[in-house]
Structures are given as C-alpha cells and as structure tokens.
Amino acid sequence: MNCPSIRPPAAPGGADAEMRDLLLAAIPALRAFAYSLTYNLDRSDDLVQDTLVRAWTKAESFQRGTNLTAWLFTILRNLFYSEQRKRKREVEDAEGVHAGRLTSLPEQEIRVEMREFQTALDTLPLSQREALVLVGAQSFTYEEAAAICGVAVGTMKSRVSRARGRLIETLGMTGTDDIGADALTRAAAGSAP
C-alpha cells in the first residue's frame, strides 16, 4: 500500500528566505515594544509570536522597500489592542500588588534611577507611553510612529511632548539636563544621546 508523501505546506505568497531573515532580525525590537505594552514577559513573547505568524501568513501584503519594522509594530499593536478588548474581565493590578512582588532591591545607583524611571513611565497613559517608546526608545520618526498607531503626526508629537513633560515632572527634574547617562532615559525624555 502506497502512502502519500507528506509535504510541508507551501510558504504563503511573499514569504521567502529573505522575509524570514528580516522577521528574525526584527524579534529584539518586537520583544521590547511588546514588553513596553504588557509588562509581562510571557504575554509579550506570545504577542511577538502571534505577530510573526501573522506577518508570515500575510507576507504578500507587505510592500517591499518600505519599513518592515513599522509594519510589524502595527501588527503587534493591533494584536495587543484586540487582546485587551478580549481581556476586559481580567482584574487589573491597579494597586501594584503583583508588580510589587516582581521587584528586587537595586544594587547600584543606575538601577535605582532606572526603577524610578520605569515607575514614572508606568504612570503615563498607555497612548503616551506607547508614543514615547516608539519615538524615544525605538527611534521611529514621528511619521512612522503615527502610522503604527493610526493617528495624525501632530497627535503623535503631542503625545510624546506630554509624556516627556509628565516624566520630567514626575521625576522631579527641571529639564533633560538632569537625566543621567542611561541612553533609554535620555531618549525618552528627549535629550540628545
């Protein structure tokens, strides 16, 4: 009796070795962005995996020569908000009880400063935090970040400006000159590297 040979499914249109390599290269940036949205490693890894699967299966809709990372961030962001709508019944950690169990005492001054920065970042509304991470930490242009979030460029600039202002105020700074050597902190607050 002849058994038919089992073949793996063909790659979707647009999915090829080059696309695979580009997707793999984008994983660190995707993980950082996903974590900035979820603050949960498992959820962020799931989001990245779902994003990569979606990108692979919809590779034909990616326009070669454009910004792949921005396209992937848009997919990830849309998946995150879809998941948020589904999770409306979950209990939020408004009191910080769960987050408090995840903290550890800092061993160096930079860790203290980074923890303070992270706490201040956590107080920002999601739209402002998202804008700040895209423009400050991920180095997207305002135009690219606006396209990822589906808002006008002016709205993105406003969100970043408000977020930077709130961070400076929350951290008790007089301006970006008070910021230490950490590149992420400087980028988020808008000072030059």
Image (spheres, rainbow, N blue to C red):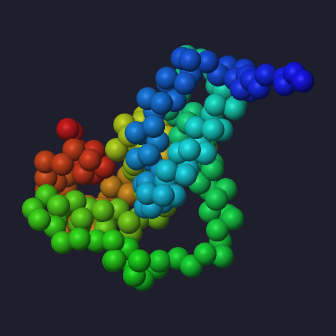
Label tally: 0
Q: Nearer the viewer, residue 158 or 59?
A: 59
x and y percentages locating residue 18 in the rendered image: 54, 17
Looking at the image, which residue sits at the far right? Answer: 1
Q: Nearer the viewer, residue 126 or 59?
A: 59
Residue 101 visible to an observer of this rendering: yes
On the picture, is 102 further left or further right than 71? left
Residue that appears at 19% across and 56% down: 175
Q: Nearer the viewer, residue 65 or 172?
A: 65
x and y percentages locating residue 66 in the rendered image: 55, 21
Looking at the image, which residue sits at the far left? Answer: 108
Residue that appears at 39% across and 82% down: 97
Quarter that holds the N terminus: top right
Q: Is residue 168 above or below residue 158?
A: below
Q: Nearer the viewer, residue 11 or 161?
A: 11
Q: Is residue 115 above or below residue 66?
A: below
Residue that appears at 31% across and 66% down: 120
Q: Quadrant of residue 57?
A: top right
Quarter that holds the C terminus: top left
x and y percentages locating residue 95 in the rendered image: 42, 83
Residue that appears at 84% across and 25% down: 3
x and y percentages locating residue 171 in the rendered image: 23, 66
Q: Is residue 116 above or below residue 64?
A: below
